[in-house]
Image (cartoon, helix red, strand yellow):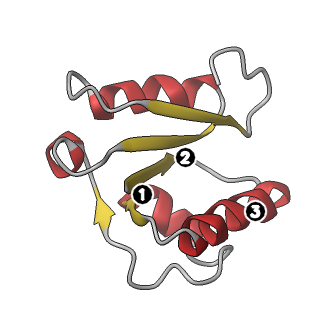
Amino acid sequence: MKVAVYGRLLDISKAQIVQYLFDELRKRDMECFIHDGFYAHLVKKIKHLEGIPLFSGYDDIKDQADFIFSLGGDGTILDTLTLVRDSDIPIMGINLGKLGFLS
């Protein structure tokens, strides 16, 4: 299974949760893609990200990802919608924000 991961800024207090997600994906031999902007933010906070392919937009994941994790709050979910557009990629929201009504 191919999984894309998108997020925006990550509060350092949430780094353990994100680390757990990547560790679990690795254990299950899931192929991962990380949004390049999120990767740049994660690389100093999360271990074992080397070698994971990056994506920057819709064209990079439209035929590649089986689903996408959206890590953040409701604004991040809305950003994720612009990434998947009409590709029918399901979005799994993980609320790391404040309200979390959508995620």
Which quadrant does the C terminus fall into?
top right
- Please tell me whether mark 3 sits on a helix, a strand or a loop: helix
State whether residue 87 is above or below residue 12.
above
- Front residue of 70/23: it is 23
Instruction: Give left or right: position of 42 versus 56.
Output: right
Labels 1 and 2: the sequence-earlier one: 2
Label 2, residues with CA under 10 Å away: few <14, some 14-19, many ≥20: some
User: Which residue is tagged 2?
Assistant: 8
Between marks 3 and 2 in the image, the one whose residue lies nearer the viewer: 3
Report x, y in % for residue 39: 47, 65
The amino acid type found where label 1 is placed reads Gly
Horizontal and vertical percent for residue 99?
A: 78, 20
Q: Position of residue 66 (x, y in %)?
A: 33, 44
Residue beneath the point at 29% across and 31% down? 84
Which secondary structure lies at badge 2? loop
Say if mark 1 contacts mark 2, CB within 8 Å.
yes
Q: CA distance from mark 3 to mark 2?
A: 13 Å
The disc, 3 or 1, on the residue closer to the chain's N-terminal end is 3
Q: Could you tell me how far apart the alpha carbons at marks 1 and 2 are, in whole angstroms?
A: 7 Å
Residue bearing mark 1: 37
Q: Secondary structure at mark 1?
A: helix
Rounded to the nearest whole Å, what is the CA distance between mark 3 and mark 1?
A: 16 Å
Q: Residue furthest right?
A: 13
